[in-house]
Amino acid sequence: MIYLFALPITFGVIILDSFVFMSLWNWYIPVVFGFQSLTIVQAFGISLVVSFVTHKEHLVSHQVKKENKYALMTTLLKPFVYLAFGFIGTLFLS
């Protein structure tokens, strides 16, 4: 039953992470370095490569439901925090 919710949540997090990466890239990289802006598909590809190169093995352990809820909340909220701080940073660009 829980696996029915895991797949849509996973796809949602992937799209959200790609959107945040694209937004941060488009806010800073073209202005600072003169590179081109990214689409969401390009942002997904770059983040896929980066996660492949920097992947760290995590030992799977049996966690209690409270820890799983905390992990889910941080997974969903972290991109919004990055996006907020990135937007605040763009206010200081000239």
Image: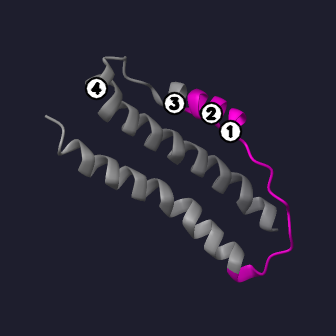
Q: Which residue is mark 2?
A: 50
Asked if disc 1 and disc 2 are in contact, CB closer than 8 Å, the reply is yes
Quarter of the figure with the N terminus: bottom right
Whichever of callouts 1 and 3 sits on the residue coming sooner in the sequence is 3
Distance, label 1 to label 3, CA atoms, is: 16 Å
* Element type at mark 2: helix
**In the rendered view, does 65 fall on the left or right side of 60?**
left
Q: Is residue 50 magenta?
A: yes
- Three-letter code, disc 2: Val
Range of magenta residues: 44-66
Q: In the image, which disc is placed on residue 32?
A: 4
Distance, label 4 to label 3, CA atoms, is: 18 Å
Quarter of the figure with the C terminus: top left
* Element type at mark 4: helix
Asked if disc 4 and disc 3 are in contact, CB closer than 8 Å, the reply is no
**In the rendered view, does 57 fall on the left or right side of 45?**
right
Residue 21 point in image, percent of width and height: 46, 39
Distance, label 2 to label 4, CA atoms, is: 21 Å
Q: Is residue 70 magenta?
A: no
Tell us which disc is closer to us: 4 or 3.
4
Distance, label 1 to label 2, CA atoms, is: 6 Å
Distance, label 4 to label 1, CA atoms, is: 25 Å
**In the rendered view, does 61 fall on the left or right side of 56?**
right
- Three-letter code, disc 4: Val
> For the residue carrying disc 3, how many other residues have a C-alpha within 10 Å: few (<14), some (14-19), or many (20+)?
many
User: Eyeballing the image, is 27 above or below 84?
Assistant: above
Quarter of image, res 28: top left
Residue at left 52%, top 39%? 18
Distance, label 3 to label 2, CA atoms, is: 10 Å
Q: Which residue is mark 3?
A: 43
Q: Which residue is mark 1?
A: 54
